[in-house]
Amino acid sequence: MNLQLNLATAPQPNNRPFVAYSALLGVVGIIALALLSLAAIRSWHANRDLHADMNRWSSSIEADQERQRALAAEFRTPADQQVLGRSAFLNSLIDARSFPWTKVFMDLENTLPPGVRVVSIQPELVNGRAEVTLEIGAVNDDGKIAFLQAIEKSKAFSGLVVTSERHSDQPSQSDKIVLNLTVWYSTT
């Protein structure tokens, strides 16, 4: 007859569930560590490649800037400056030829009241817009005021600025008032 007696004052605890859960938690932790390490290594490689690309582009930009400085120095020679000056002059002539003179005179004809005439007109292209400097002769103040109001209401002209006004009391002159003004002309 075999009899089992426990002589201890307290029974021995069963630690198997704790050991099993601890081992499972350890395996999950090791897997998570491996995945995070893999992600960190991939990120490090990607950053290294990105930094290599950035360094390559930076060196390319520096080389291009150096070439640009060399070309700019080459174009600063007196002969090249003369050619650039000639081309700027020719471009200004082309711009002056392309100014719509007929349309400007038609628009001025629609805005000129009786007793007012255009003495001189000088267009200048500024940033793709036409700034027109006008000298206007008027017989009296009523004609001058009617002309200024007509210019302000016109769709073709805008930004009216009167730069000077002269009065003449000489009977030999037909224009008693001479106005100098600038306006923006819409070429469209």
Image (cartoon, rainbow, N blue to C red):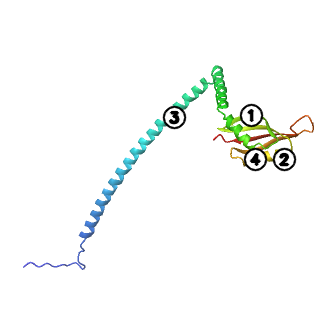
Disc marking residue 95: none
Q: Secondary structure at mark 3?
A: helix
Q: CA distance from mark 2 to mark 3?
A: 65 Å
Q: Which residue is mark 2?
A: 142
Amino acid at pointer 1: Gln
Q: Secondary structure at mark 2?
A: helix
Please say if 73 is above or below 40: above
Q: Which residue is mark 4?
A: 150
Amino acid at pointer 4: Ala
Q: Residue at x 77, y 38 (%)?
A: 134
- Counting from the top left corner in percent of width and height, residue 10 is at 25, 79
Whether residue 127 is visible: no
Nearer-the-camera pick, 82 or 168: 168
Viewer-side label of 2, 3? 2
Disc marking residue 122: 1
- Counting from the top left corner in percent of width and height, residue 117 is at 80, 38
